[in-house]
Image (cartoon, grey):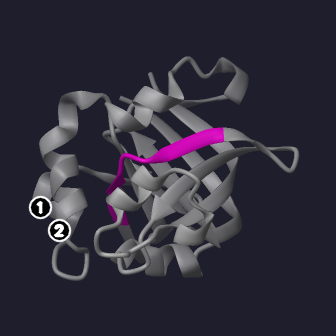
């Protein structure tokens, strides 16, 4: 199956359940060197006059290194059919495994970006900002419960430059 490009106005998906129920792969790097990890936290919105994607990555994750050095990142979104494979991407490190080879999922390329060909929707994003979550900025005490190891996420903001949907 192939992909076709759509505009954000044509997007017909609930962005909350896209992350919470379908999960997604965040991929950064280029054709010669990249890594991907499962994300189940994210958001789509508008900031600085740009359609944007927000993804959360802990600094100790291997993909964080790729997000730091790459101008682009992709978010490949799935329905629930690939849970086993996405669980592997979320629990194993790219330092130790070729996660695409291990799971049978397929890496694909669009210019300088890498995404998962098995996804239903792909967002190609250009990094615009990063900020670190800090516990002093939490207004709700229960948030701290998500960080028993005090390993707070960095938030990457990326302008959505292309959206691909499976045909």
Q: Quadrant of the C terminus?
A: top left
Question: Which residue is more in the foreground, 120 or 43?
Answer: 43
**Main secondary structure along the magenta-highlighted residues:** strand
In this view, the residue farthest toward the front is: 141
For the residue pair 148 and 111, the one nearer the viewer reads as 148
Q: Residue at x 16, y 74 (%)?
A: 97
Circle 1 packing at 10 Å, graded few (<14), some (14-19), many (20+), is few
Residue 52 spot, x, y in % from top left: 69, 46
Q: Which residues are magenta?
A: 36-44
Residue 162 position (above or below residue 36):
above
The residue under label 2 is 92
Q: Are the residues at dot 1 and dot 2 in contact (C-beta closer than 8 Å)? A: yes
Q: Any magenta on residue 42?
A: yes
Measured from the top left, where is residue 57 in percent x and y? 45, 66
Count of numbered badges drawn on the protein: 2
Front-lying residue, 59 or 159: 59
Which of the two marks, 1 or 2, is nearer to us in this view?
2
Looking at the rendered structure, the secondary structure element under dot 2 is: loop
> Which residue, given by chain and number where applicable, does mark 1 sit on?
102
Q: Is residue 10 visible?
A: yes
Res. 7 in view: no
SS type, badge 1: helix
Residue plotted at (25% across, 74% down): 94
**Quadrant in which residue 12 is drawn:** top right
């Amino acid at each position: 199956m192939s992909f076709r490009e759509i505009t954000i106005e044509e997007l017909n998906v609930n962005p909350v359940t896209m992350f919470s129920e379908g999960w997604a792969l965040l991929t950064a790097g280029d054709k010669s060197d990249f890594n991907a990890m499962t994300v189940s936290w994210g958001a789509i919105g508008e900031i600085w006059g740009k359609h944007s994607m927000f993804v959360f990555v802990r600094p100790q994750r291997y993909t964080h290194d790729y997000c730091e050095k790459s101008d682009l990142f992709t978010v490949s979104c799935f329905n629930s059919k690939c849970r086993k494979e996405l669980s592997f991407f979320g629990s194993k490190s790219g330092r130790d495994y070729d996660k695409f080879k291990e799971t049978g999922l397929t890496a694909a390329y669009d210019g300088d970006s890498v995404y998962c060909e098995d996804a239903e929707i792909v967002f190609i994003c250009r990094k615009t900002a990063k900020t670190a979550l800090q516990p002093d900025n939490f207004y709700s005490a229960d948030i701290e419960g998500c960080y028993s190891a005090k390993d707070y996420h960095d938030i990457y903001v990326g302008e959505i430059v292309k959206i691909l949907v499976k045909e």
